[in-house]
Image (cartoon, rainbow, N blue to C red):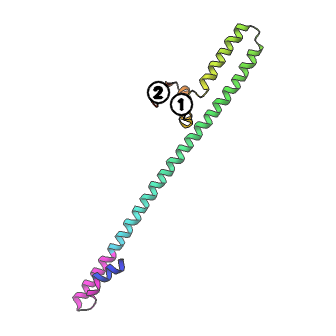
């Protein structure tokens, strides 16, 4: 297409006297400069698109890394609570006083309830997200209230 435009705009100046040859050279120079400017602009647009795509990929990878860190922290927390519950069960089994044993079981039940999936909306993705947020809020002393499908969920 560039060759066609060049030929149409400049071929009439090829034959003729010295002035038309000078006009031909000037128009040819302007045409080549225009092609060069368009090429540079196209390259800049391509580079901007690549930078945008790179930023999007970096954002995705960063979010995945944050999810990995949160998952690792949750696994550590669960393992710690598992070990503590094991010790509590051993202590409860060793307890001979039925009142103290019942109080210890009630306390352990409360601990288990605090770490179980509290959100049963029927949507497994929403349940997982809300449970993760709830655990984060519990770890950092934040009160969380959420509304899902018009229903108030308290944590």
Q: Is residue 96 left or right of residue 104?
A: right
Judged left or right of residue 50, residue 66 is right
Label 1 SS: loop
| Vertical side of 115 occupied by 97: above or below | above
Residue 139, quarter of the rendered image: top right
Q: Mark 2 highlights which residue?
A: 151
State whether residue 18 is above or below residue 29.
Answer: below
Question: Who's the residue at 34% across and 69% down the image?
Answer: 37
Q: Earlier in the sequence, mark 2 or mark 1?
A: 1
Residue 133 shown in magenta: no
The residue stretch that appears in magenta: 10-32
On the image, the x and y values in percent for residue 43 come to: 41, 65
Q: Which sits in the foreground, 128 or 150?
A: 150
Q: Is residue 25 magenta?
A: yes
For marks 2 and 1, give the CA distance.
9 Å
| Helix, strand or loop under label 2 | strand
Residue 121: give its label: 1
Does residue 7 sit above or below 114 in this rendering?
below
Return the x and y of residue 13 as percentages of the image width and height: 26, 87
- Percent x, y for residue 1? 36, 77
In x, y percent, where is residue 52? 44, 54
The local crowd at label 2, few if under 14, some if 14 to 19, many if 20 or more residues have their Cα within 10 Å, is: few
Q: Is residue 115 left or right of residue 19?
A: right
Q: Residue visible at 42% across and 58% down?
A: 48
- Could you tell me if the residues under marks 2 and 1 are in contact, i.e. CB atoms within 8 Å? yes
């Amino acid at each position: 297409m560039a060759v066609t435009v060049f030929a149409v705009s400049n071929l009439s100046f090829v034959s003729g006297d010295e002035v038309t040859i000078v006009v031909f050279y000037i128009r040819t120079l302007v045409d080549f400069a225009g092609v060069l400017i368009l090429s540079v602009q196209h390259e800049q647009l391509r580079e901007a698109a690549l930078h945008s795509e790179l930023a999007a990929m970096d954002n995705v990878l960063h979010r995945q890394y944050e999810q990995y860190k949160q998952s690792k922290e949750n696994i550590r927390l669960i393992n710690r609570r598992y070990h503590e519950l094991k010790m509590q069960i051993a202590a409860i089994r060793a307890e001979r006083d039925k009142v103290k044993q019942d109080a210890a079981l009630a306390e352990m039940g409360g601990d288990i309830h605090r770490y179980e999936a509290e959100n049963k909306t029927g949507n497994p993705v929403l349940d997982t997200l809300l449970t993760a947020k709830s655990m984060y809020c519990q770890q950092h002393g934040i009160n969380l209230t959420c509304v899902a499908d018009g229903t108030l969920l308290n944590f």
